[in-house]
Amino acid sequence: MIFRTFLFALPFMSLSVFAGWDDINMSPGATALGQEIFGLHMTIFWICFAIGVAVLGAMAFILFRYRKKEGVEAAKFDDSTFLEFTWTILFALILIGMSIPATITMIRAYDDTEGDINILITGHQWKWQYEYIEDEVSFFSNLSTSLDERNNLAPKGENYLLEVDEHLVIPTGARIRFLITANDVIHSWWVPDFAIKQDAIPGFVNTGWTQVNEPGIFRGQCTELCGQYHGYMPIVVEAVSPEEYKEFIIQKKEAKLQQAALTEKLWTAEELMAMGEGVYQKNCVACHQVNGEGLAPVFPALAGSDIVMNDKARQIEILMEGVQGAAMQSYAEQLTEVEIAAVITYTKRSWGNDVNGNGEIVAPKEILDYKTNKL
Amino acid sequence: MSAVIESHHDDHHHGPAKGFSRWLYTTNHKDIGSLYLWFSFIMLFVGGAMAMVIRAELFEPGSQIVSPEFYNQMVTNHGLIMVFGVIMPAFVGLANWMIPMQIGAPDMALPRLNNLSFWILPAAFGVLLSTFLMEGGAPNFGWTFYAPLSTEYAPPTVTFFIFSVHIMGASSIMGSINIITTILNMRAPGMTLMKMPLFVWSWLITAYLLIAVMPVLAGAVTMMLMDIHFGTSFFNAAGGGDPVLFQHVFWFFGHPEVYIMILPAFGIISHIIETFSRKPIFGYSSMVYAIASIALLSFVVWAHHMFTVGMPIAGELFFMYSTMLIAIPTGVKVFNWLSTMFRGSLTFETPMLFAIAFVALFTIGGLSGLMLAIAPADFQYHDTYFVVAHFHYVLVPGALFSIVAAVYYWLPKWTGYMYDEVLGKTHFWLSFISVNLTFFPMHFVGLAGMPRRIPDYAMQFADYNMIVSVGAFLFGLSQLLFLFNVLKCVYYGKSATAEVWEGAKGKGLEWTVDSPAPYHTFETSPDLTKPQTNS
């Protein structure tokens, strides 16, 4: 570790000489496109490196050779049209040389024909939603690094801040097209190994594509400032064999059916509270805080809120529809009926709200009814 | 100073007023120049303190001293203050001090406008900084304030931010009108355009850029204001608006703005290098053409900040090629500076050291800029620390070093006293080492995948971030030495001669007046149509 500090003695020269290449250079790419862009990057880098060495070397020579000496007069010349033309043409030639491989790679990267599998990626504050368009499977992917690790109360794991609860699973050997958009502010979906970075913009659908041939796990992050937890919405893509992928889709579909069945079950207050606490920790604490006090003035408190304590109908409506013009988004798609019922119950019975308000429980059926009535 | 003053002029010829009102009511270009420079010096420490908070938070992985929300406020205000509160006012201050003296004019053309354009600046930054005390906190959406994060999802203080940006813009526009009017109308007889000092040329072009783009910025923030308070949907997709439109408008302002922050530096560095090389500048006319072509190109490259928004491929290629073109005039400038030093008789006083560091480190920043211009590779560089490294290389050892160099270069002319050379050189070496320690490793973490504007990061970035933070703290502390040196010069410096530097002979009209420059200079224009002799 420490010896890397030597790099600063020889900023340019040391790039490839010392160990830790991965820590100081771009990902060499896990896909053909990624490798091609890496190759382009290295070509451009070595050209710039050579120019830098030439210019700084010439400068060092001049500074040493022409320092003021006794009895040596400075020259008087102040122009040379020949030199000016020569180096202008030289620069132009170097630039043309650089633009050719860049143009070729650019055209290859910009291919948005349909994929074997098409995945709609939606950026939310501060999580990613993945929707497998053909299979009608959809889920959210949240940061799974614990608050204790972030607050230095627990040792940090190997993938600190680069781990999520639900991986985006893709099959190897297939052409995957990503359709990228956002629900609230602008985000940007970046997986360095794929060399894909596309802004996720509300109202726009951008595209990117990849084809991974070897199974593996690839990590990335949101790269457009999207609010206070911008640094906490990583991306984890898992490439698996086509068989495992099929299995994954089947599991997801079954899970969806099981969720629907849960809605019919009769829930006790304790069960709802236990589940609600988990849902709250995962989805709500970022804004409303663990203690339900919120962060004034943008994120209102839930503790002592009149709506939470006494107006069940309005609270269900807020969770289902979001609040226009505020940071509160709709959770109708993100959470199941059971989860929404549980988290509402949890907020109505926490932080003294059960004492000051009616402390009612909300059954999953009520959420289902809200949805049905809306139709 | 040998100007002959006729007796009936005596009652008009007065020195500065006493006390604070001198500064409040002054219309003197030197006073206003000093005001601008001190204002930007103070803001340098305000913005610098924010950078220190940022680097303390990033010293190690994990939450350190501030919340993610406050971290975003620091990032945003650090950027806004350094751009609008430090680099731009410092250049305007230098323009105020030096343009009249370099063109042989008695003052700026519009002295009262000059006073106004300075005094609304502290008001603008007062408004901006007051948001820290308000509910909801200061602006937190980055200095680029992309909608809808800065509209629908912004803290309520965004309205103060908009107001503040409007005032800054008004100040810049008034300043530019003044500079253009002065340069075009008040040059000494015989100073044709192609005989103007390069600093004057660079500012003439910069002032046109300002007039062209500050209204665009004003338009962008006005549309934000309408979206926030008056129900329009310029940038709101749900209302039929277009969030990408914001970025186009912003960068149509923003890219020329980048050159506004570097063109005056080109002028300064040219003067310093010719003085300490004891040679005339190499390729004067190509320097002028290079500045002009960089300025023109700056209007057609804006979308290279937006390679990842999903432009059509024709757009990507156009903006890639046009951006690469900028390397040509920039390269010409670097080669001209090298040729000026070539076969010169070089000495290395503090201004020259900063100027040399400028050329070397600006070249590095230029080369990383060329890498960023390559659109497909930019997919990987965009919004990472590689970009942070790039623009800090052109703005800190670039623009800021040129301002520091200019202060050391002209301080004896302004105050009549020499600064402490040993302290100056110490300041230089500390700054030079720490600036590289701060910004060079950012290239590495950026390429390795660290995004910008994050308050916490993955473990593999830990080593370099610690080095960056140490470098940043050292750089911050070194600037206290600069402040000390300036104050020491003002209060305890040794007297300076009119020419100050051995190599300054024949290098401009400012060296023909006494040190300190009298309160009023060139009340009678020097006649340059006759062969010139240094007074």
Image (spheres, rainbow, N blue to C red):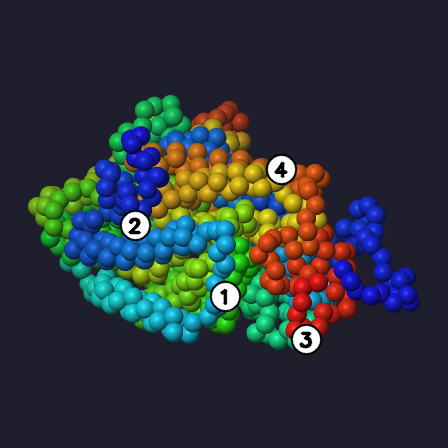
Q: Secondary structure at mark 2?
A: strand
2 or 4: mark nearer the eye = 4
User: What is the spatial separation of the Cα atoms under label 3 and label 2, in whole angstroms?
Assistant: 65 Å
Disc 3: CA contacts within 10 A as few (<14), some (14-19) or many (>=20)? few
| Disc 3 to disc 2: CB gap under 8 Å | no
Residue at horizontal 81%, vertical 53%?
B16
Chain letter for mark 1, please: A
Residue at horizontal 12%, vertical 50%?
A213
| Disc 1 to disc 2: CB gap under 8 Å | no
Q: Which residue is mark 3?
A: B530
Residue at horizontal 27%, vertical 40%?
A23
Residue at horizontal 76%, vertical 56%?
B518
| Disc 4 to disc 1: CB gap under 8 Å | no
Q: Position of residue A330 (x, y in %)?
A: 40, 47
Residue A14, label in figure: none
Query: Does label 2 lie on the same chain as label 3?
Result: no
4 or 1: mark nearer the eye = 1
Q: Identify which amino acid the numbered label 3 is placed on.
A: Lys
Drawn side of residue A59 relative to residue B254, left or right:
left
Query: Does label 3 lie on the same chain as label 1?
Result: no
Chain letter for mark 3, please: B
Q: Which residue is mark 2?
A: A190
Query: Does label 1 lie on the same chain as label 4?
Result: no
Q: Which residue is mark 4?
A: B484
User: What is the spatial separation of the Cα atoms under label 2 and label 4, in whole angstroms?
Assistant: 46 Å
1 or 2: mark nearer the eye = 1
In depth, the one of B427 and B176 nearer the eye is B427
Instruction: Work out whether mark 3 precedes mark 4 in sequence or the reverse, and give the earlier one.
Output: 4
Q: Is residue B528 above or below residue B263?
A: below
